Image (cartoon, helix red, strand yellow):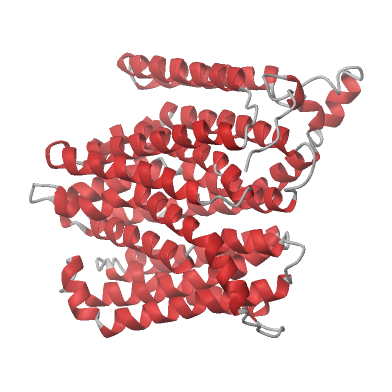
Amino acid sequence: MSKLKAIAKDTVIYGLSSIVGRFLNYLLMPLYTAQLSAASGGYGIITNMYAYVALILVLLTFGMETTYFRFTNKTHEDSQTVYSTTLLAVGTVSLAFATLVLLFLRPLSEVMGYGDHPSYVGVMAVTVAIDAFLCIPFAYLRQQKKAIKFAALKLLNIVVSILLNVAYFAWMDGKDVGYAFYINFVCTAMLALCLVKELTGFRYTFDKALLRRMLNYSWPILVLGIAGILNQTADKMLFPYLYEGSDGLEQLGIYGACSKIAMIMAMITQAFRFAYEPIVFAGVKDKGQHEMYAQAMKYFIIFTLLAFLMVVGYLDILKYILRRPEYWVGLKVVPIVMAAEIMMGVYFNLSFWYKLIDRTIWGAWFSGLGCAVLLAVNILFVPKYGYMACAWGGFAGYGVAMVASYVVGQRHYPINYPLKDIGLYLFLAVWAYITMRYARAWGLWPSLAVNTLLILLFLAVIIRRDLPLSQLPVVGRYFRARNPGQSGKSGNPGQSGQSGQSAPSPKA
């Protein structure tokens, strides 16, 4: 229970920076969609370019964030040497990448379709190279439990970005989409200055033997990461090449803008990952870890399903984030993309079994399988069905990877997940969603009233069955005072479902 509290505490801090940061970033979406019409293809360029950036960031970090956590917690490794070796390795690769892109900028821009604007490609290459390098000091902050500084820097970066974007696109009424990329570079450079303390004050040591061991651990994670990020971005990179219409960037912009609304799931998963990953690796030998994994999975699913219902329940209000009604035609992808993100989060939770037994090759297989499914759906159906095929491709890809990881994981590292509890909440969420769909026919305000009641009902079930009220600050003191005999009963995560069973030993 104490570890679940630690995860919850850090998830709140990381989640605050992630969710508030993403929410502030949402302010850019109405700004961009107000200034850049769908027909101009401006938001399509942003969507396409940042899809490439996400993939390149994975390539340049090559799994070294997770590898750093794993090796810095090994008793026979010197943590400072692990840190400095990781910094030097990622920094060297990032510098080489930026140099090569700048040397071959013109032909590369032509291939990507930005021959008229090579500066877009150049500035984003330098920006992503710096971002990749900074991932390691940010990982160091997480490993050192410096969640406040981590969150503060992330929020600072986003606030400055928003202010600069507002200055250009709103106050100056700018229309050049390239300024979005130039502003990103300025903010990344500012972050590098803020992390000087984490990059100096110690002797850099490069241990070749250590790096070889780390690479043996990280290369399957790299493959996993490539497949995973392709699951998120391949559709946005391939869409201009697969879509048969002449309005490819316009359609991509609609899909990208509407998908942004669904990114609340990505925020929750990211916040959970930032808090969960260091704790898992630090406590790998602790007793009771299996039960903690099972309970963490249950609570993750419960609250992502709640977030799903809140977004789809108020989608008729949230759509106004997209300033131009011409974007609203793509809102039908939101529930599909959110469901895919939930499965991606479950897959992430399931991924620890092969990381903890140093069999990360399994992750490469699972993610590769999911990526293959996604690519197949996109290649076969995007030409005819457009961005709807992109949404269903992600859903199918994550679903296959999730199921495969669970089935194989239960053989090699069995964990008694509370499947009955999870199944109950899944059933309630699906029922509520279907009811919401039918309620739309009654008009805006009646449907919003019904949706609110359904969300409150789902929340009431959570509180009644699984929310540990007696453990919460402030509320918990009141609850224990009013119910002194129940403080150890209500919401005890070890007393529901199958998770209270003893877990079998993992099989390597």
Instruction: Say above or below: 421 vs 295.
Output: above
Residue at image coords 44%, 52%: 224
User: Which corner quadrant of the image does residue 94 belong to?
Assistant: bottom left
- Measured from the top left, where is residue 403 in percent x and y? 45, 32
Looking at the image, residue 132 sits to the left or right of residue 144; the answer is: left
Depth check: give the residue in front, 157 or 216.
Answer: 216
Residue at image coords 29%, 35%: 392
Looking at the image, residue 242 sits to the left or right of residue 267; the answer is: left
- Measured from the top left, where is residue 370 in percent x and y? 37, 41
Looking at the image, residue 267 sits to the left or right of residue 12; the answer is: left
The image quadrant where one finds the C terminus is: top right
Depth check: give the residue in front, 265 or 36.
Answer: 265
User: Which corner quadrant of the image does residue 324 belong to?
Assistant: top left
Q: Could one spot residue 338 in this view of the protein?
A: yes
Q: Could one spot residue 325 in this view of the protein?
A: no
Residue at image coords 30%, 62%: 49
